[in-house]
Image (spheres, rainbow, N blue to C red):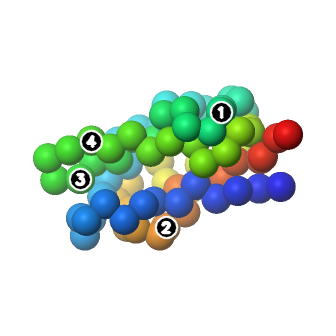
Amino acid sequence: MLKQIVCPELGAERLEVCGWLAEVGDEVSEGDRLVELLTPGIIYDLPAPADGVLQKIEQVSGNETHAGEVLGWIEVTG
């Protein structure tokens, strides 16, 4: 089953994807630091929402994103 990695509501109108801490094909565990998001003045580490394998990255480093947008997909394992 695929699970979305969704940009959270962080109280900022615009956010920037600073970087991914995993690559497509990497196994991740729920709670692992997965994506760094930049808000004005802070870098937020978005955790993996489930155990699985990172399948697709929708928003690459440098992209502007907003709350609710899909950043990527995890194939849930277990």
Q: In 3D space, how far apart are the residues under numbered discs 3 and 2 (Cα atoms)?
A: 15 Å
Q: Looking at the image, is 21 positioned above or below residue 43?
A: above
Q: In 3D space, how far apart are the residues under numbered discs 4 and 1 (Cα atoms)?
A: 21 Å
- N-terminal of the two: label 2 or label 1? 1
Q: For the residues labelled 3 and 2, say whether their Cβ atoms are less than 8 Å apart.
A: no
- N-terminal of the two: label 1 or label 3? 1
Residue 45's disc number: none
Q: Tell me the residue at 49%/67% (across/down).
A: 69
Q: In 3D space, how far apart are the residues under numbered discs 2 and 1 (Cα atoms)?
A: 21 Å
Image location (x, y in percent) of residue 30: 62, 39
For label 3, the residue is 39
Front tag of 1 and 3: 1
Image location (x, y in percent) of residue 27: 71, 30
For label 1, the residue is 29
Q: In 3D space, how far apart are the residues under numbered discs 2 and 4 (Cα atoms)?
A: 18 Å
Judged left or right of residue 70, residue 16 is left
SS under mark 4: strand
- N-terminal of the two: label 3 or label 2? 3
Image location (x, y in percent) of residue 9: 37, 65
Q: Looking at the image, is 69 positioned above or below residue 59?
A: below
Q: Tell me the residue at 39%/40% (across/down).
A: 45
Q: Which amino acid does label 3 sit on?
A: Thr
For label 4, the residue is 43
SS under mark 2: loop
Q: Tell me the residue at 54%/33% (across/down).
A: 32
